[in-house]
Amino acid sequence: MPFDTKRRDFLTLLGGAAAWPFAARAQPVNGVRRIGVLLNGSASDPDAPSCVRAFQESLEKLGWTVGQSSQIDYRWGAGEVDATTTAAEELRV
């Protein structure tokens, strides 16, 4: 398995784990669910789009369609502790 695939799979898993506490909060029963994803990388990273796409494809396999049954809010920490803390606080709201 190429390194990029392993990295994407790991980031997908990490993103899912980061989103779980936010997705588990009270949500409307039949409405659009809001999912918060906190990633340690940067949105400008060349691998970022493929990681986001892999995460969304994984959700779609589980029946979560972005824009219909879910809304995903991404935040990027860019490897900085302060930026990650701020991004996490933004997702808490």
Image (spheres, rainbow, N blue to C red):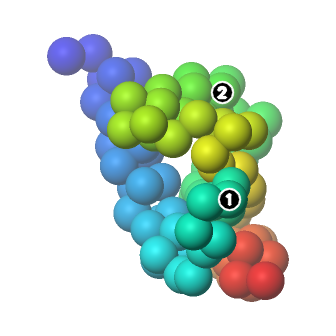
What residue is drawn where x is 51% and y is 41%? Answer: 64
Q: Which mark is residue 53?
A: none
Marks 1 and 2, how far apart at CA: 27 Å
**Which residue carries the number 1 mark?**
31
What residue is drawn where x is 44% and y is 68%? Answer: 20
Q: Which mark is residue 49?
A: 2
Q: Amino acid at mark 1?
A: Gly
Location of residue 34 (image quadrant) = bottom right
Q: Amino acid at mark 2?
A: Pro
Q: Is residue 89 visible?
A: yes
Residue 17 as seen in the image, left or right of residue 55: left
Q: Is residue 55 visible?
A: no
Q: Which x, y percent locates residue 22?
A: 56, 74
Badges 1 and 2: C-beta atoms under 8 Å apart? no
Out of 8 and 93, give the one closest to the viewer: 93
Local SS, label 1 = loop
Out of 60 and 31, give the one closest to the viewer: 31
Image quarter (top left, top right, bottom left or bottom right) of the N terminus: top left
Q: Which x, y percent locates residue 36?
A: 64, 63
Location of residue 62 (image quadrant) = top left
Residue 24 as seen in the image, left or right of residue 67: left
Out of 61 and 89, give the one closest to the viewer: 61
Q: Which x, y percent locates residue 17?
A: 39, 63
What residue is drawn where x is 61% and y is 60%? Answer: 30
Image quarter (top left, top right, bottom left or bottom right) of the C terminus: bottom right
Vertically, is 62 above or below 57? below
User: How busy is the neighbourhood of tag 2: few (under 14 within 10 Å), some, or many (20 plus)?
Assistant: few
Local SS, label 2 = helix
